[in-house]
Image (tube, grey):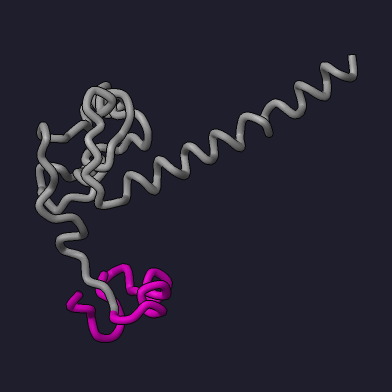
Amino acid sequence: MTQWRALITRQPLLCSIPYGAIVATHAVMNHTNTRVPYGVLEHLIVSPRIHHWHHSTDKKAYDKNFAVHFPWLDRLFGSHYAPSNEWPKEVGLDDAVFPKGFIQQHLDPFLRNPEIGQPKGDPSTR
């Protein structure tokens, strides 16, 4: 009986380590600028191309591609957007204004006046 209990209590840990490695690798891969073709797999697993559309400045891609791993979930909920074999021309925040400097950018959410919406100090020109 104790052998079964030991196996059952260790099982989540044994599963979570490989799962964590796969999820971390997938997340890093989706944020790279590699043009690795996923082919048919792109219907089953989110590729860098699909995820880049999520970050696109193209207004047609706003509020699209929320699924982290499985693009069929976006298709199911109507939020899928990935023109075939196209990559977005530009990614980023089209109308956002950020303060200059690494430290200021990290403090900005705590210092910004929510009524005005502008950062304190000189804005960055990127």
Q: Name, please, the residue furthest toward the right.
A: 2
- Residue 92 sits inside the magenta stretch: no
Q: Residue at 13% of width from left, 44% of height from top? A: 87
- Compared with residue 28, is residue 20 higher up or lower down, i.e. above or below? above
Question: 54 or 99, which lies in front?
Answer: 54
Q: Residue at 10% of width from left, 40% of height from top? A: 86
Name the quadrant containing residue 10: top right
Name the quadrant containing residue 72: top left
Position of 47 with respect to 69 (left or right) is left
Q: Name, please, the residue furthest toward the top.
A: 1
Question: 35 or 44, which lies in front?
Answer: 35
- Compared with residue 80, is residue 33 higher up or lower down, i.e. above or below? below
Q: How many marks?
A: 0
Q: Residue at 25% of width from left, 40% of height from top? A: 36
Residue 76 at x, y = what percent? Answer: 27, 21
Q: Quadrant of the N terminus?
A: top right
Helix, strand or loop for the magenta stretch, by majority: loop
Q: Name, please, the residue furthest toward the front.
A: 36
Name the quadrant containing residue 123: bottom left
- The stretch in magenta equals 100-126
Q: Residue at 34% of width from left, 28% of height from top? A: 70
Q: Quadrant of the C terminus?
A: bottom left
Residue 85 at x, y = what percent? Answer: 11, 35
- Residue 111 sits inside the magenta stretch: yes
Position of 11 with respect to 79 (left or right) is right
Residue 8 at x, y = what percent? Answer: 75, 21
Residue 111 at x, y = what percent? Answer: 39, 76
